[in-house]
Amino acid sequence: MQIIESTTPILIVTVSLIGAILIALTGERNRNLREFLTILVAGIKFVLVFSMVELILKGSVITYTAFQITDKLSIAFKVDALGILFALTASFLWIITSFYSIGYMRGNNEKKQTRFYVCFAIALSATMGVAMSANLFTTFVFYEIITISTFPLVAHKGTPEALAGAKKYLTFLLATSIAFQLTAVIMTYNYAGTIDFSNKGILEGKASDSIITIMFILYMAGIAKAAMMPFHGWLPAAMVAPTPVSALLHAVAVVKTGVFVVVKVVLHIFGVDLLQRLGLGVALGYVASFTIIMASVVALTQDNLKRRLAYSTVGQLSYIVLGVSLLTTSGIAGSIMHITLHAFGKITLFFTAGAIYVVLHKTEVSQLAGIGRQMPFTMAAFTIGSLSMIGTPPLGGFISKWYILVGAVQAHELFFIVVLSISTILNACYFLPIVYSAFFKEPSHDNHHGGHHHNDHHDTCLEGKHIFLVAPLVLTAIGALTAFLFSGYLFDLVSIVLKGVR
């Protein structure tokens, strides 16, 4: 394994920070320049991330130390196959989300748009910081920056409801990470003498089994961004945010950072062998299974579309946790692939929810009868996103679910196979009726929701006026389809991760 010293990681993190400053300076005075900067910065970031892929595929690791605090404590970056996969997903979807945000924020005449774009840029910088961190300290610092920089985004509307949701969001995420995660990091440093990520883990033989078990529990409780129950309450509460925020938080940045850190801690702090010996993988699998089923049941009861999607996210994230907790090659592979494959499907669904709101002012599932005729592109994209969530071939979501299922078979865990089967049925139960009612039911002609009433022959032009909203969701839906065909490339990166940890 070749280790390459390069400044690219620090450039990837700082490019958005520079962007944030420029966006703040441009402000409302020149909206077009402000939005152009947002897209430019997103583009540069993606190109920089992409430039490292070839080296990583050849088995190299790219490192860079930004600040050395003490001889064992530093803000340092190490880009490996797992990190590049997450960074590629987030930076690519960030470009599409930037276009979508312009359509949404302008179409909805949102206030404080400059603050919105500034916080967005900082949050993405921090996400890249987590993706490429070399140790737990760096991970922790950027993890907290994500929480703080997304708080104004959740509170964006400034209504009492938005402020209450944002307060719950901040309290949950800060309290868990400071009380549990930070304690676990300090304990790790104390016992292992290092907090650098290592392929085989760093805790084997460093502390008694009971201490290691306590540390494992502290980590899992402290990474509340993974939204495992009972630490999931912040996620539905954050649905008060504007839809581009929901899309970024629940498909790309915040929640994916959570499960990404879970995967890193499982593989690179504890290691597969240690967790197998202590039976902690199975225990984590049971918590994930409970979350998968409960979240799906709650999703069934939600009439608000974004809340239904939020509970769906809670369940889908625990697929990633379940996959890695199996500690089998296929389980880990499915877990890592689901980070990317879920992102494309879920961001599509949030984009469609936002488009429906901007164009027709509808927010509830019960209002969506016949909407497929008014917004055919949007609802076609919604259908593709839903099928990917359910895990239907030939969509990306099928592949990661299949690997997790095979991983459960490899682990001889019948219980987890049953959980995956039941949750697939539940996913179908809360998505397919929406699709059915959108395309096959008569539209209700009640107009008290502030929806615009159009004659039938005007219906087709509804989406045309909102090209910035509709084009991104069509793109991500195509992404969810093509992800199936190009999953081989994903697997090339995943197999490098597997070689290291097994």
Image (cartoon, rainbow, N blue to C red):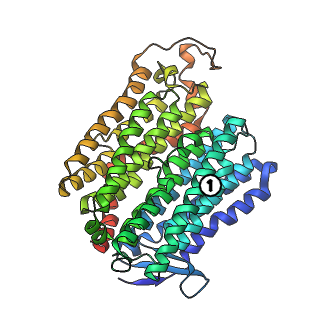
- Examine the image and state in which quarter residue 446 appears: top right
- Seen at 57% across and 35% down, the residue is 354
Q: In this view, does 339 lie to the left or right of 276?
A: right
- Seen at 38% across and 24% down, the residue is 433
**Can you see residue 483?**
no
233 vs 196: above or below: above
**Can you see residue 424?**
yes
**Circle 1: residue type:** Ile
- Seen at 55% across and 11% down, the residue is 445
In the rendered image, residue 279, in percent from the top left (x then y), is placed at 28, 62
66 vs 239: above or below: below
Viewer-closest of 42 and 411 = 411
- Quarter of the image containing the C terminus? bottom left
Q: Classify mark 1: residues with Cα within 10 Å, few (<14), some (14-19) or many (20+).
A: many
- Quarter of the image containing the N terminus? bottom left
> Which residue ends up furthest to the top in the rendered image?
445
Q: Is residue 397 left or right of residue 159?
A: left
Q: In this view, does 447 lie to the left or right of 306?
A: right
Secondary structure category for the residue under label 1: helix
> Which residue ends up furthest to the right in the rendered image?
29
In the rendered image, residue 21, in percent from the top left (x then y), is placed at 74, 62
In the rendered image, residue 298, in percent from the top left (x then y), is placed at 43, 33
Residue highlighted by disc 1:
39
In the rendered image, residue 255, in percent from the top left (x then y), is placed at 50, 52
Q: How many labels does the image show?
A: 1
- Seen at 47% across and 57% down, the residue is 221
Viewer-closest of 384 and 454 = 384
- Examine the image and state in which quarter residue 206 appears: bottom left
